[in-house]
Image (cartoon, grey):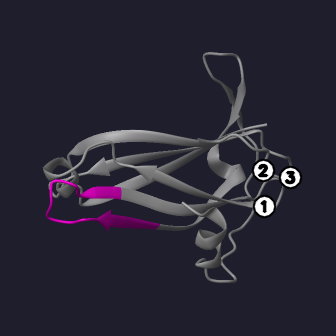
Amino acid sequence: MHRRRLLALVPAGLVSSAGCLEYVTNDNGEDITEPGDVDIVWDDLVRDDPGTDDERVTVWGVVRNIGERTLYYVEIRATFYDAEGEELESVIENVDDDVSTGEEWAFEVEFPHFGERAAEVETYELEPATGV
């Protein structure tokens, strides 16, 4: 995926209000902040090869650091659901680069199954987490 090309697709002016830092510590002792530091400014469910054994489902999106600190860890959890609202799978994507205040980061989270399993995906939810 070409992150710059995806960023060009984001409409100008999509800005959210700033959040505040709330810290929790993960099992490794790292400070992980609540998602108030990250705003998902755009996301979309994309299907490739629908109706075939090669059908794939991916969520593309863009997040923005709206906090006052550089983030050293950004995580997006995508939870995929079927038509009845039953959870099919939860997948995490993260960024390894530092994300400065105001900076945007394009992400792509792929549903881990193909074909009929991918065809079951109807909706999804995104949940960000960050680390400073």
Residue, disc 3? 68
Camera-nearest residue between 43 and 4: 4
Pointer 3 local density, CA inside 10 Å: few below 14, some 14–19, many at least 20: some
Q: Image quadrant of residue 104?
A: bottom right
How packed mark 2 is, by other alpha carbons closer than 10 Å (few <14, some 14-19, many 20 or more), is many
Amino acid type of the residue that numbered disc 2 sits on in the rendered structure = Val
Are the residues flagged by discs 1 and 2 in contact, CB closer than 8 Å? yes
Q: Are marks 3 and 2 in contact (CB under 8 Å)?
A: no
Figure check: 79 above or below 28 = below
- Which percent across, then down, holds residue 18? 75, 61
Residue with the mark numbered 2: 99
The residue indicated by pointer 1 is 103
**What is the x, y in percent for residue 130?**
67, 41
Q: Nearer the viewer, mark 3 or mark 1?
A: 1
**Which residue corresponds to the image point at 64% horizontal and 77% vertical from the top-left?**
8
Which contiguous range is marked in magenta? 44-57
Mark 3 touching mark 1, by CB under 8 A?
no
Quadrant of the snapshot with the C terminus: top right
Label 2 secondary element: loop
- Amino acid type of the residue tagged 3 in the rendering: Glu
Identified at 24% across, 65% down, the residue is 49
User: In the structure shown, which secondary structural element does the residue marked by tag 1 occupy?
Assistant: loop
Residue type at mark 1 is Glu
In this rendering, which labeled residue sits more in front, label 3 or label 2? 2
Residue 46: x and y, percent? 36, 66
Residue 20 versus residue 89: which sits nearer the camera? 89
Specify whether 72 is left or right of 4. right
Q: Earlier in the sequence, mark 3 or mark 2?
A: 3
Of 17 and 11, which appears nearest the observer?
Answer: 11
